[in-house]
Amino acid sequence: MDGVVFRRAAEAESEALFALLCTAFEVTDEAGRQRLRRLADEEWHDLVVLVEGTQPLAVAHVEPHRLRVGACSVLKAEIGHVAVRPDRQRQGLGTRLLQEIVAWLPAERFQISRLGGWMPFYQRFGYEPFPRRYVTIPVPAREATLKGTPWRDLLAAPTGKQGEVRLYDPAHDFHPVHRLRLAAALRPGALVLPTNPGLPPALGPDASKPVFVYLHDGSIQGYLRGGLARLHAGDPDLHYCLDELAVTAWDPDAVGALVKTLMARAAEIAPTEIMARLPYDERLCEALTAAGIPFNLLELRQAWDGNMMQVVDLYGVLRAITPELTRRLREAGCCPWQGNLEIRLPRHSAVLRLAPDTVTALQKGTPEALLEMSHAAFIKALFGIQGLAECAPGLARLSGPQQVTAGILFPRLAAASGAWG
């Protein structure tokens, strides 16, 4: 493939890239073409390409996402729309594109990466299967009954409450909703939101977009965004999705009123279920139960076509989160073990130096303890999806004090969902 060059896309290439994407994905419907048009015209700066001369042969979208880890964050590369020009497929260009991207990401200061697709292909480049998490909420048919009681009565908003639900009005609700969203975004694994969101848009309520707020005594206490959408890229069907829920202290009245409002919308195609990207948080589970809303916790672990992640810069991850690890150690009030702990992943290793009140990241160091694990296991521990003791089988080879220290640094937490799956 002499003469084939990998680089960032240029704005002048947007028309050619739009044509490449449409033909590669065989998109002919107008809605699909509009999505690809926006990608090529408005997000060209996040596209990377393989070109031969002036002709783009392959393209991928590399979108930066900052994900929360306590008071710190890591930079994730969200890879999507990987496409090769149809007349140049099966010539190794897809392989070349992924090899170039994975080598390029650390130089661009990315630390982890996620994509979804055909797993046997992407595993060749270091990506590992990673779960997706949902809360699913069944919406029965309007006429259905449960032990003689109509579902419409069971799901009716409770009487005697002072709260009310109305459509979100950006012009008036922008700042109080942003404060709610900021509080919810403190969860590990959540997208980092800007502290200062800027000026509110000069727009009124938009009834075509089901975004709701819950008010109590005139104060906004909850926010819900959801509606008909495709669950994953390429999904031909529309589903009712609950994309974001931010409620003060998981108040059951607010949770119930907001979720039941979306359920009433979904009832137009009932029986169905709402797919919700919500944290696995026991307080939220208790709020849903108190509000009389049935739900299921669903964790998808695909085997052929699905979600995948990898670490592209382990030292960069550890260096970014050492302030948070130091905080956890200090709040524990003890450091059961001190020394150099090497964390070793496939193709990556780095060292954490543990002192009584400080954690430091080192690219290299003489290890006194070694912890080997997969990329997926490390990322689960990073975001508190699982505690390190649950997801790292090598932990058993550490001494008791070493295991306790590792558990203090990487505990199980009520992690956000969606941004990593």
Image: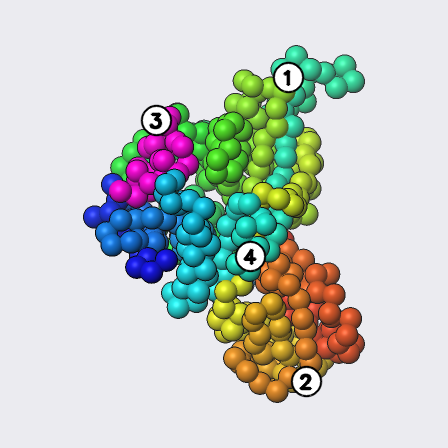
Q: Nearer the viewer, mark 2 or mark 1?
A: 2
Residue at 58%, 78% in the rendered image? 351
The overriding secondary structure of the stretch rendered in magenta is helix
Any magenta on residue 35?
A: yes
Residue at 73%, 61% (x, y): give it.
390
What is the CA distance from the residue labelled 4 to the residue labelled 3?
Answer: 35 Å
The answer to whether any part of residue 263 appears in the image is yes
Q: Secondary structure at mark 2?
A: loop
Q: Is residue 218 left or right of residue 387?
A: left
Left or right of 315 on screen, residue 205:
left
The amino acid type, in three-letter code, at marker 2 is: Glu
Colour treatment of the image: rainbow
Q: Which residues are magenta?
A: 16-40
Q: Position of residue 268 (x, y in %)?
A: 54, 18
Q: Which residue is mark 2?
A: 368
Name which of mark 1 and mark 3 comes first in the sequence. 3
Quadrant hosting residue 399: bottom right
Identify which amino acid the numbered label 3 is placed on: Glu
> Label 1, label 3: how many angstroms apart (C-alpha)?
32 Å
